[in-house]
Amino acid sequence: MSDQQFDHLLTNLRRVDPDNDIFKGNKLLSLANGDFKEWLEEKLLPDTRLIIEPKIDGCAIALSYEKGVLNKAINRKGTDKTEPLRTIQNIPSTLPIDQDIQIRGELYGPGLEPAKSQRLAAGHLRKKVPTGEGLAFCAFQILNSDLNHSTQLLELEKLCFEVPESEFTKFSTSEVELYRKLWLQGKLFNNYPTDGIVIKVNSRKLQKQLGENSVCPNWALAIKV
C-alpha cells in the first residue's frame, strides 16, 4: 500500500465511531426479506442509489481491530469466536492503519452448495481445534463508519479483505427484478454459495435516516426467490 493510499485510509477512518455497541454484547442484525417492490415504494425515493450484492450462505461474523491489530471476533449471537477466526487465511491479523475499525462479513465455503457452506462454517466455529480448511471470509461493511457503502467496499479492498461482487442501480423495480432473474438463472454471483441477493441503500446518511429495528436494518432487504 502506498503512502498516499495509507493517508487516504486514515483520513476516512478518522470519521468512524469507536463506540459502536456490537462488541458490547449486542447481536449482529439479520436481514429482512419480503416483497422488494413494496419495500422500494414504501421506504425509498425514486433517485435513491442502490447496491446489489450476493446473499452468501455461511455464518455472520464481526471483526474488531484495535490500532490495526485483530483483537476480537464474534458470531451472530455475540459469542467470542476470535481463535477459530484466526485460522482463516484471508483474514488479516494486522492492518496497515493505526486505527480502531470494526468489520462485518460472512464466513463461507467457496465452491460449495449454500447448505454445505453454512454447515462447514458453523462446524468450524464449534471445533476445539479448528483448521480453517475450505473456508474464507468476505467483508462487506465497516460497522463503525460514516462512509457510503460503495466507499466502504473500496476501503475494505485496500485493506486486503475479500469483498463481494456488487452491482449498482437506481430505484427501479424493473432493474431489481432483472438482477433477481439473472441470479435465479445462475448468471449473477455464481462464484458464491448464495441463497439470494441483497438490496442495500448506498448512502450512509440515508441509512441512518431509515434506521433499524431490534432484528434488522431498514435500509437493506434480502430477496430469496
Image (spheres, rainbow, N blue to C red):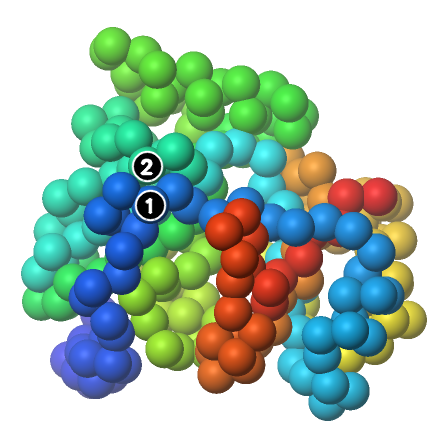
At 45% from the left and 25% from the top, the residue drawn is: 121
Instruction: Indicate the amino acid at tag 1.
Output: Asn
Residue under label 1: 26
Q: Seen in the image, is 61 located left or right of residue 23?
A: right
Horizontal and vertical percent position of residue 162? 42, 52
Q: Which residue is rendered at x = 77% and y = 79% of the image?
A: 171
Q: Residue at x 57, y 74 (%)?
A: 210
- Graded by Cα atoms within 10 Å as few (under 14), some (14 to 19) or many (20 or more), the crowding at tag 2 reads some
Under circle 1, the secondary element is loop
The reply, left or right, for residue 189 in relation to residue 208 is right
Q: Which mark is residue 78?
A: 2
Q: Do tag 2 and tag 1 residues touch (Cβ < 8 Å)?
A: yes
Task: Name the spot of residue 202 as percent of width and height, x first.
Answer: 56, 76
The mark found on residue 140 in the picture is none
Residue reaching furthest to the top: 128
Residue 7 on image: x %, y %: 17, 82
The Cα–Cα distance between marks 2 and 1, rounded to whole angstroms, is: 6 Å
The amino acid on which the numbered mark 2 sits, given as a three-letter code, is Gly
N-term-proximal mark, 2 vs 1: 1
Quarter of the image where one finds residue 160: bottom left
Quarter the C terminus occupies: top right
